[in-house]
Amino acid sequence: MQASGESVRIGDGGVAAALLGWYDVNARRLPWRALPGEPAPDPYRVWLSEVMLQQTTVAAVRAYYAKFLELWPTVDALAAAEDADVMAAWAGLGYYARARNLLACAREVARRGGFPRTEEGLRELPGLGAYTAAAVAAIAFGQRAVVVDANVERVVSRLFAIADPLPGGRTAIRAATDTITPDQRAGDFAQAMMDLGSSICTVKAPRCLLCPLADSCAARAAGTAEAYPVKAEKKAKPTRTGTAFWIEQDGAVFLVQREGKGMLGGMRALPDDGWSARTDGHATPPVPGEWRPAGVVRHGFTHFDLELQLMLCGSADCASLPPGEFWPVDTVEAAGLPTVFAKAARLALANR
Ligand code: SF4
């Protein structure tokens, strides 16, 4: 890492020049990246990584990214995949709507014969939001686009000391980012901002002495860097309760496929009581049998926390089971259960 040299000024290209100079030396090596000076990466890889990285850390994404590329090396291969296979491969990454959108988008790209090259064209693809469109346009196609993720939000809010609280403050942050985004190397600039945010301009204790933008930074000058970005007060998350059922027969556990677009839609799961709507946690088992409680699994979703009571069955009358499948208990971790049900499965295996 190197400290900043000459003084730079906001708005005259100085920020971009200083940042790109820093990036040329300090760019992170990531599997989906091209380093400065290398040809732009395949848009499929850029898009796939950006979708995975939303709400998820680089460390968590690496293995999933490698697995997806191995299973589906091209967007056409992904477009031809079975829904259930993709949902299972995504299991554990969370925010499962992303996987459903990923498939819808891949199929539209395959139908069109490739990714559109502009931000506007990319926005027309199903499930592809403003951030991803800007990132793919800039990084894969070298288009000037204003790319603002959480790292960029933090850097820019500090650089300009933007005091409007998030989420409303995003308009001002985006406008400020626009003023410093260069016409050339917009993809490198976006990735440089992300790298600066993750390695130097960190949430706690930013390392301003090593920052190439230190001389331009309003928050640093005021000694208030950690106060940005300002966030609106969070409402306390509600807690919901529900019940999941472990029905085992001949070394296999009964799994269902959750309905299309609801919570964890399309994923394999243990049968449950529809906890997304319940508050009391008392539920009728799907089949008669000798049921006993086996503990509670706690899991945090974006808008609520879940306490999921797990019920085990000694001997169940399986004649009246709803549609589903029996999956070998020994390989249940390969069933692609979303995290909350994977936790429930581990609890069942420890208590059966
Ligand atoms: S000087 Fe400090 S607060 Fe300002 S952008 Fe750099 S690391 Fe962040």
Image (spheres, rainbow, N blue to C red):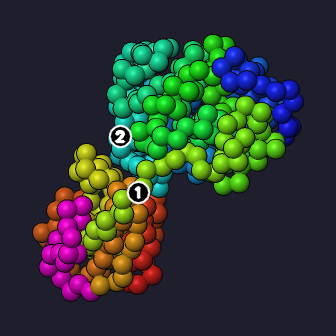
| Disc nearer the start of the sequence (2/1) | 2
| Rendering coords of residue 81 (x, y %) | 40, 36
Q: Relative to the observer, which residue lies in front, 78 or 116?
A: 116
Residue 348 appears at what percent x and percent y? 39, 77
Does the beta carbon at disc 1 come under 8 Å from ligand 1? no
Percent x, y for residue 72? 50, 35
- Residue 41 quadrant: top right
Q: Secondary structure at mark 1?
A: loop
Q: Which residues are magenta?
A: 272-292
* Label 2 crowd bin: few (<14), some (14–19), many (20+), radius 10 Å: many
Residue corresponding to mark 1: 234
Q: Amino acid at mark 1?
A: Lys
Q: Residue sitting at 59 percent across and 20 percent down?
A: 179
Q: Is residue 302 magenta?
A: no
As rendered, which of 311 and 135 lies closer to the eye? 135
Image quadrant where one finds the N terminus: top right
Seen in the picture, residue 317 relative to 273 is either above or below; the reply is: below
Residue at 31% from the left image edge and 65% from the top image edge: 238
In the image, 166: left or right of 262? right
Q: Nearer the viewer, residue 56 or 336?
A: 56
Residue at position x 62%, y 28% in the image: 190
Per the image, label 2 sits on a secondary structure element best described as: helix
Magenta stretch: includes residue 280: yes
Q: Main secondary structure of the magenta part?
A: loop
Q: Disc 2 designates what residue?
A: 100
The amino acid on which the numbered mark 2 sits, given as a three-letter code, is: Arg
Whether residue 90 appears in this view of the structure is yes
Q: Is residue 80 visible?
A: no
Quarter of the figure that contains the C terminus: bottom left
What residue is rendered at 46% in x and 59% in y?
334
Viewer-side residue, 307 vs 145: 145
Number of residues whose C-alpha sits closer than 10 Å to that of mark 1, classed few (under 14), some (14–19) or many (20 or more):
few
